[in-house]
Amino acid sequence: MSSVSVGVRIPSNLYEKLINHTHKINTSKSEVIISALAKYLDATEDVPLSVKVANLEKRIVLLEKNKLDKT
């Protein structure tokens, strides 16, 4: 898939959240932005694989936590 460069201006508080999220899931700003844009535009097939894996890992943690809470 080819790609293009896009420049945008975002509020500083949103940028801080972006940086925190990239550190949390160990991915790039580009991958998070691509993922968010793909979800917003209902083009989830374009979500980067690393973001999909990170989301699955979060879901597994929640499922395991729920399972432990029920026992």
Image (cartoon, grey):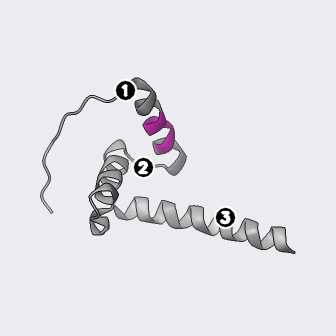
> Which of the image's four quarters has the N terminus?
bottom left
- Of all residues shown, which one is farthest toward the right? 71
Q: Which mark is residue 24?
A: none
- Of all residues shown, which one is farthest toward the top? 12
Identify the mark nearer the N-term, 3 or 1.
1
Find disc 3 in the rendering and name its residue: 62
For residue 21, side relative to residue 29 (left or right): right
Residue 10's place in the image compared with 24, above or below, is: above
Answer whether labels 3 and 1 touch (C-beta < 8 Å). no
Q: Which mark is residue 27?
A: 2
Q: Marks 2 and 3, Cα distance to the nearest angstrom?
A: 20 Å
Disc 3 is placed on an element classified as helix
Disc 2 is placed on an element classified as loop
Disc 1 is placed on an element classified as loop
Please tell me which residue is depicted at 37% across the width and 26% down the height of the picture.
11
Q: Nearer the viewer, mark 1 or mark 2?
A: 1
Please tell me which residue is depicted at 87% across the width and 75% down the height of the picture.
71
Kind of residue indicated by mark 1: Pro
Structural crowding at the residue carrying mark 1, measured as other residues with C-alpha within 10 Å and reported as few (<14), some (14–19) or many (≥20): few
Answer whether labels 1 and 2 touch (C-beta < 8 Å). no
Answer whether labels 2 and 3 touch (C-beta < 8 Å). no
Structural crowding at the residue carrying mark 2, measured as other residues with C-alpha within 10 Å and reported as few (<14), some (14–19) or many (≥20): some
Residue 5, quarter of picture = top left
